[in-house]
Amino acid sequence: QGQVLNSDELHELYEGLKLNNVNQYDYVLTGYTRDTSFLAMVVDIVQELKQQNSNLVYVCDPVMGDKWNGEGSMYVPKDLLPVYRDKVVPVADIITPNQFEAELLTGRKIRTEKEALEVMDMLHAMGPETVVITSSDLQASLGNNYLIALGSHRKTKADGTKMTQRIRMESPKVDAVFVGTGDLFAAMLLAWTHKHPNNLKVACEKTVSAMQHVLQRTIKSAKAQAGEGNKPNSAQLELRMVQSKKDIENPDIIVKATVL
């Protein structure tokens, strides 16, 4: 229940921050949005904040849809796609699409790792320095029970040359449907890239390892609540964030990244 914040309301809140001179930010993070005017307003605000602080990092999770049994579908209005593609992604520094969203943004299908890297290059060319494809249906070397995530960080060195670091991660699939995993991923990636700005490998290892700890704790707890032989319901699968505080702050690295 509740209302969706619209662009006028967002603008009013931002004006209040400005009036009180508290519009100095290091990071902006956006996720699930259903309204095109709201998204366009976010772009205006991010551009203004970047004038205040040229080091501001905008992390955008372009939440538009996902794949189920190999078929992709959007769960936001279709008119959000051109706004993300033409306005939002160009001002973003870090983006965290899943495979389906990366395909939507570039108009390219991903069937192989090579194609995934090409798609990430296309996304870099649109603006963001860091691109992480948070999940994909690519074949993992460890087998079908693993999910592949890919990361790419492109830096322009002082002499103008571009350097790209690319990584692949394979993490165990957890057999359940969770809500909020994308939000948690983007938030933790923001935190770990802040701590390790020039090391995408470590930032991703910490992010994905912490995700695993949270998901494993959640599924274990949900199964205990549901009882022997029963499938946990969505309330029981609520992410165990508070219980995972230590893992979020200092995750034991259980998923290693391979540098490509």
Image: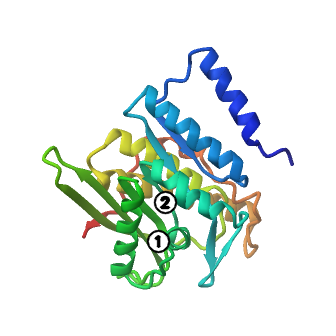
* Pointer 1 local density, CA inside 10 Å: few below 14, some 14–19, many at least 20: some
Instruction: Say which quarter of the image contains residue 257.
Output: bottom left
Across and down, in percent, residue 246 comes to 47, 41
Disc 1 to disc 2, C-alpha distance:
8 Å
Residue where numbered disc 1 is placed:
172
Residue contact at pointers 1 and 2, CB within 8 angstroms: yes
Q: Residue at x 34, y 39 (%)?
A: 195
Pick the residue in front: 127 or 30. Answer: 127
Q: Residue at x 56, y 15 (%)?
A: 21
Residue farthest top in this picture: 20
What number is the disc on residue 212?
A: 2
Q: Residue at x 72, y 41 (%)?
A: 7
Residue 219 visible at all:
no
Pick the residue in front: 49 or 110. Answer: 49
Across and down, in percent, residue 137 comes to 49, 79
Earlier in the chain: of badge 1 and badge 2, it is: 1
